[in-house]
Amino acid sequence: MKKRKTLYGILAAVSILFILYALADNYMIDPRAEGFLSHKTGLRRELNLPVWLNVMHVHVACACIAMAAGLLNFSNRIFEKSRKFHRINGYVYVVSVLLVVITSGYMAPYATGGKISSMGFNALNIIWLLITIMALVQIKKKRMIRHRNWMIRSYALCFTNMSIHLITSLFHQGFGLIYVTSYTIGVYGSIVLLLLIPNVIIRTIGQSVR
């Protein structure tokens, strides 16, 4: 129990800080995403900037909502206090993930790194949607532990953007690779990490049901 509380505390701190950073960066500091767009070169499709920015802002907002909703639903205290809120909030999470996936699908063809990165994002979208559906199916069947485990896997993918930028910075600034190559490595590296880490967490907290 103590281990779970510690993990939840760390998760809450990281999630809240990232949500605040994402909102500040995308809506206040750089609302036109000039810094991010400066790395997009050699696009095969013409970028309709006003449309892309609107989609990006919806994408960021929904990603933050998904992260916040998921965090609340991992709280045992909230679950014990109101299961109705847990259920409604769960649907908020699912809808938010769906909107993130849809908006990501629009932006994928314009991904930094071209077609290779685009394929990675499309694969990630499909994986995230399937994992989230599995979590929903399990709770419909009253399989609480399996539902929790699939939700852990789904929630991990909320950290895709953060993971991509951390890995990109590591290879670009740490190892000196060009930004585009570093970003592509970040995309695929994030997919691998965010599929592996949840299984480590599930084993750590115990009661995992396969």
Image: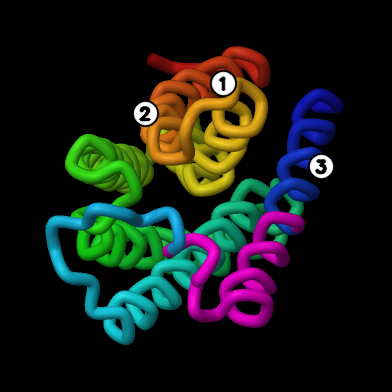
Where is mark 2, residue-wise? 188
Disc 3, SS: helix
Q: Residues within 10 Å of mark 1 (few under 14, many from 20)?
A: some
Between 80 and 12, the one nearer to me in the picture:
12
The magenta span reads: 17-37
Report the residue at 22% width, 35% height from top.
116
Q: What amino acid is at disc 3?
A: Gly
Q: Which residue is mark 1?
A: 202
Q: Looking at the image, is 177 positioned above or below residue 88? A: above
SS for tag 1?
helix
Q: 55 left or right of 60? A: left
Q: Which mark is residue 9?
A: 3
Q: Residue at x 59, y 80 (%)?
A: 27
- Dominant secondary structure (helix, strand or loop) of the stretch shown in magenta: helix
| Kind of residue at disc 2 | Tyr
Image coordinates of residue 45 in percent, x first then y, are 13, 63
Label 1 vs label 2: CA separation? 22 Å
- Residue 26 lies left or right of residue 45; in this view the side is right
Where residue 36 appears, as percent x and y from the top left, is: 49, 60
Mark earlier in primary sequence (1, 3): 3
Residue 82, horizontal then vertical, whole percent: 64, 64
Q: Is residue 19 magenta?
A: yes
Cβ atoms at labels 3 and 2 below 8 Å apart: no
Evaluate whether residue 121 shows in this view: yes
Q: Earlier in the sequence, mark 1 or mark 2?
A: 2
